[in-house]
Image (tube, helix red, strand yellow):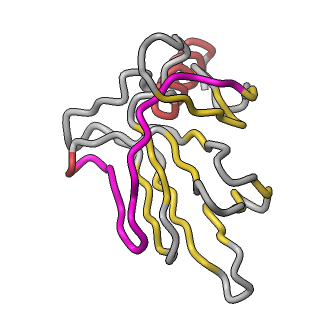
């Protein structure tokens, strides 16, 4: 691949995984984050996390906050609106025109791709990502 094409390819790929701070999407084919709660526990989700603490009343502490590149993460408190997601339901995706940007379990510890997270700690997801959470037979909640 020629250098210019490689640079353009990398830029395009980073745009696909970069989150939207506004949390909006206009529908298919525009990618929108989605979370699927296939557990018997209540989750919380947010569509509007913002590093400006005056932007929203609520607060979300993300263990993997990033603004541009998902490999450059930090633990960060941001403003957000927290919304409930009942057991065995889902939210987001391009057909719903809802872009979910993060989630947590408020009353339960959970695992994200094999890494344990404490209840109430938020996980950020990309616009192109669908996260599915299951309850294992040992009672642990796992999301990937």
Say which quarter of the image contains residue 139: bottom right
Say which quarter of the image contains residue 57: top left
Left or right? Give the position of 26 relative to 19: left
Q: Quadrant of the N terminus?
A: top right
Left or right? Give the position of 81 relative to 78: left
Residue 101 position within the rendered picture, expressed as x and y whole percent measured from the top left:
46, 38
Residue 129 position within the rendered picture, expressed as x and y whole percent measured from the top left:
48, 48
* Figure check: 76 above or below 35: above
Residue at the outermost right position: 115
Range of the magenta residues? 76-94
Residue 7 position within the rendered picture, expressed as x and y whole percent measured from the top left:
58, 16
Residue 25 on the magenta span: no
Please, what is the dominant secondary structure of the magenta stretch?
strand
Residue at the outermost bottom position: 137
Nearest the eye: 112 or 28: 112
Q: Residue at x 38, y 46 (%)?
A: 83
Q: Residue at x 46, y 66 (%)?
A: 37
């Amino acid at each position: 691949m020629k250098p210019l094409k490689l640079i353009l390819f990398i830029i395009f790929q980073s745009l696909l995984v970069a989150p939207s701070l506004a949390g909006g999407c206009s529908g298919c084919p525009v990618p929108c984050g989605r979370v699927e709660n296939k557990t018997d526990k209540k989750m919380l989700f947010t569509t509007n996390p913002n590093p400006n603490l005056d932007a929203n009343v609520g607060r979300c502490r993300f263990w993997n906050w990033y603004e541009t590149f998902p490999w450059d993460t930090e633990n960060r408190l941001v403003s957000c609106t927290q919304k409930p997601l009942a057991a065995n339901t889902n939210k987001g995706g391009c057909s719903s025109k809802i872009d979910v940007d993060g989630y947590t379990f408020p009353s339960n510890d959970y695992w994200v791709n094999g890494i344990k997270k404490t209840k109430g700690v938020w996980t950020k997801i990309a616009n192109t990502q669908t996260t599915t959470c299951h309850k294992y037979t040992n009672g642990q909640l796992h999301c990937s």
